[in-house]
Amino acid sequence: MNDVMFKTPVQEIRLSDTADRMFIKRDDLMGFSFGGNKVRIAWEFFQDMKEKGCDCLVAYGSSRSNMCRALSNLCSRYGIPCYVLTPREDLVEEGTFNSWMVKWFGAHIRFCHKSNVAEGVDKLMAELKSKGYRPYYIFGDRYGKGNEKAAARAYCQAYRELLEYEEDHELHFDRIFLASGTGMTQGGLMAGQRQYGGHARITGISVARPSCRGKSEVARFAEVDPEDVDFEDGYVCGGYGLYDGDIESVIRMMMERFGIPLDPTYTGKAFSGMLKYLKARPHEPENILFIHTGGTPLYFDYLNAVWDRKQAAKEITNNRCTGQ
Ligand SMILES: *Cc1c(COP(=O)(O)O)cnc(C)c1O
């Protein structure tokens, strides 16, 4: 696999109710494992693992995790044993498209408690060492610190692709928006801007965390002051994975009008949040870039859930008819 696999197009879309020009960096269209930010980041962890002479990968994530899918797919591709540590509290009993793929790729699943991930990491690392492996935990030490540079490298590179696009098309982006969770993606973009230049304001739309925590996490990856991080927590919609009718209608509109899948946990929430953010701040027309961070399997999970609801509604209607 090489860099060509990661290069993704920038697409302009025309939204009717705004004077801004709207562009989307289609990181969901990468040539490996459904793409997305986690494929870029997983690739950097994978290289870091090899550089450190390790021979077994330990991932951490929930049943919905795009990261665990991307990592376990890289492991299946290159024949590296893969272990996934999952917080029991976040287990989706019936499974998700990502969790089914993780199993399909042959990864081994281990559980821990969210309140004590460090202990879970220690236990698993000890187990793997006793088996003769040199395990690599993607986030570094037992507290998840130490591999920030590897994680940030992914979107530092992606930022350079954006600069190339700007040069080739003789335009510049005034703002960049993206879904921000752990902060690895936004932190990488900010590191790229520091390294390669540019003035776009980079705004992370939080998918879960309050601004105070979000800013300090992004800052850790970007190596900047938390005060310099633009992290917006006004569109969290009650918490991770939760969504409302506004998010759902944006998802519908984007798929129907442009054929672009968004999911309610990350990209749909962030895109909807971005539109509200811009609307709430009257401004001269700008060039806006949204980074589509992928997560296509979550779009299908969403479709499953919507379908279930539709089925349920239909059954109620049918019962009503037969009851007459
Ligand atoms: C993980 C994820 C994000 C958030 O990225 P972070 O680097 O964790 O901030 C956004 N979108 C999708 C689809 C993701 O899987």
Image (cartoon, rainbow, N blue to C red):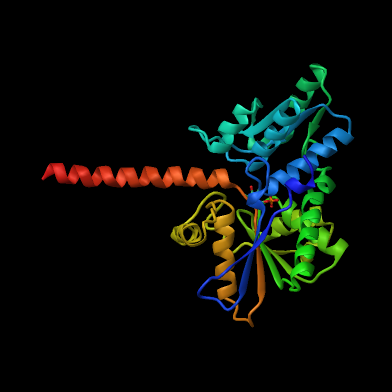
Can you say whether 152 is above or below 204 in the image?
Answer: above
User: How far from the left and from the top, in percent, is residue 63?
Assistant: 58, 36
Can you say whether 37 is above or below 229 in the image?
Answer: above
Q: In which quadrant is the N terminus drawn?
A: top right
User: How far from the left and from the top, in percent, is residue 123?
Assistant: 74, 25
Q: Is residue 120 visible?
A: no
User: How far from the left and from the top, in percent, is residue 316?
Assistant: 25, 45
Is 35 in front, or is 143? 35
Residue 291 lies in what quarter of the image? Answer: bottom right
Extreme residue toward the bottom, this view: 284
Residue 307 lies in what quarter of the image? Answer: top left
What residue is shown at x 77% (from left), y 37% (from top)? 138
In the picture provided, is 241 more to the left or to the right than 47?
left
Q: In which quadrant is the C terminus drawn?
A: top left
Can you say whether 133 is above or below 92 in the image?
Answer: above
What residue is shown at x 50% (from left), y 44% (from top)? 300
User: How far from the left and from the top, in percent, is residue 45?
Assistant: 79, 40
What is the number of callouts on the image?
A: 0
In the picture provided, is 207 more to the left or to the right than 150?
left
Extreme residue toward the top, this view: 131
Is 147 in front, or is 23? 23
Q: Is residue 147 visible?
A: yes
Is 184 in front, or is 176? 176
